[in-house]
Image (spheres, grey):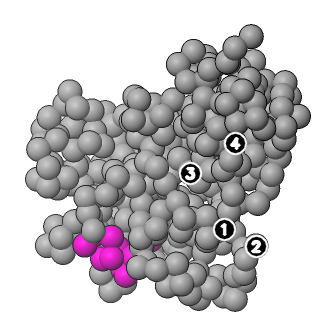
């Protein structure tokens, strides 16, 4: 297994360390230039000079390009800044004037982050090259990668009885066998950005592109044992989202939009929604991001009410 060691801004690090424990953070790039690693990859925070040390780590969950505003709406202070203006100023400084309303940052979304106290920092890779700008991948099964991975896991074990980022069946403080990818648990912020990206920033039903009125809807609510997985999500216009949550509309397992007769029976309106009745929703290009048929069936059976025949 490989991990990724990312050069990290000290202000971002200390701001978030003061706010832990955190379910997730957004390790953003000032411009969206991509990140190629499988979900579950250990992601290490390497502080820049003069610190030159690993200050913590987490588990890479997902990468998406997004506007700074969407990233702020989804993560808030978990972007490592106290206000949106403070974050936007930092983005503009690092992006060297290429910012603006349409500018996209890269959102490297990291689950279950750990931020170590100063005295617990881990020596950076002894073969780290000074010309590395963004970061570098390392083999965690041998050499410097294994040393850093074991040291970070041991520190996490001291911070909590069981580190959530490792296999719960294996005591964290033991010497470790072969590293394995773990499936990261997505948080609410990651869910919002990931669902928005999966659907190309457009409502799955209406095609609306105005991000301020688009919301990441859970098919099975989080409070009803639903997850933040993208396959449990739909990007919906806010009014359609409300109707979906209250059972006035649904999406069938074969991806058709259905409107309950209750909307007309109880409220004597709904013409705008009935005009969309039966249309096939827009699906994400990636098959893994498409809504799970069983979850849609659950919503059909447990939330949606058709009304009188």
**Residue 243: x, y in percent?**
64, 38
Q: Along the horizontal axis of the image, is 73 left or right of 23?
A: right
The residue lying at 69 percent from left, 42 percent from top is 240
Name the residue beneath numbered marker 4. 240
Closest to the camera, between mark 2 and mark 4, is 4
Q: Do the residues labelled 2 and 4 touch (CB within 8 Å)?
A: no
Q: Along the horizontal axis of the image, is 134 left or right of 31?
A: left
Residue 22 or residue 116, whichever sits in front? 22
* Structural distance between the alpha carbons of marks 4 and 1: 23 Å
**Quick one: SS at disc 2?**
loop
* Structural distance between the alpha carbons of marks 4 and 3: 16 Å
The residue lying at 37 percent from left, 81 percent from top is 11
Residue 111 or residue 246, whichever sits in front? 246
Q: Quadrant of the N terminus?
A: top left
Which quadrant holds residue 97?
bottom right
In primary-sequence order, the first of circles 4 and 1 is: 1
125 is higher (above) or lower (below) than 223: below
Q: Along the horizontal axis of the image, is 89 left or right of 199?
A: left
294 is higher (above) or lower (below) than 94: above
Q: What stretch is highlighted in magenta?
A: 6-18
Name the residue beneath numbered marker 2. 102
Q: Are marks 4 and 3 in contact (CB under 8 Å)?
A: no
The residue lying at 76 percent from left, 35 percent from top is 268
Residue 192: which disc?
A: 3
In primary-sequence order, the first of circles 1 and 2 is: 1
Q: Is residue 285 something one can see in this rendering?
A: no
């Amino acid at each position: 297994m490989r991990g990724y060691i990312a050069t990290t801004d000290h202000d971002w690090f200390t701001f978030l360390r003061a706010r832990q424990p955190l379910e997730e953070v957004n390790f953003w790039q000032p411009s969206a230039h991509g990140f190629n690693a499988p979900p579950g990859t250990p992601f290490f925070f390497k502080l820049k000079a003069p610190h030159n040390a690993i200050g913590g780590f987490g588990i890479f969950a997902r990468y998406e390009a997004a506007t700074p505003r969407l990233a702020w709406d989804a993560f808030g202070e978990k972007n490592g800044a106290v206000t949106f203006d403070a974050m936007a100023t930092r983005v503009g400084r690092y992006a060297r004037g290429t910012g603006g309303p349409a500018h996209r940052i890269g959102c490297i979304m990291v689950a279950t982050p750990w931020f170590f106290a100063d005295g617990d920092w881990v020596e950076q890779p002894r073969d780290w090259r000074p010309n590395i700008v963004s970061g570098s991948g390392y083999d965690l099964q041998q050499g410097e990668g294994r040393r850093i991975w074991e040291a970070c896991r041991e520190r996490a074990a001291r911070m909590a009885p069981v580190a959530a980022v490792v296999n719960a069946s294996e005591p964290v403080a033991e010497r470790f066998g072969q590293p394995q990818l773990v499936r990261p648990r997505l948080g609410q912020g990651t869910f919002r950005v990931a669902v928005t990206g999966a659907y190309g920033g457009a409502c799955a039903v209406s095609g609306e592109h105005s991000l301020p009125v688009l919301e990441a809807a859970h098919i099975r609510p989080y409070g009803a044992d639903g997850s933040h997985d993208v396959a449990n999500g739909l990007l919906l216009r806010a009014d359609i989202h409300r109707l979906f949550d209250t059972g006035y509309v649904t999406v069938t397992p074969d991806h058709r939009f259905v409107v309950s007769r209750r909307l007309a029976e109880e409220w004597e309106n709904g013409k705008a929604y009935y005009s969309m009745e039966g249309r096939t929703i827009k699906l994400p290009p990636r098959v893994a991001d498409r809504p799970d048929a069983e979850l849609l069936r659950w919503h059909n059976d447990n939330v949606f009410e058709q009304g009188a025949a």
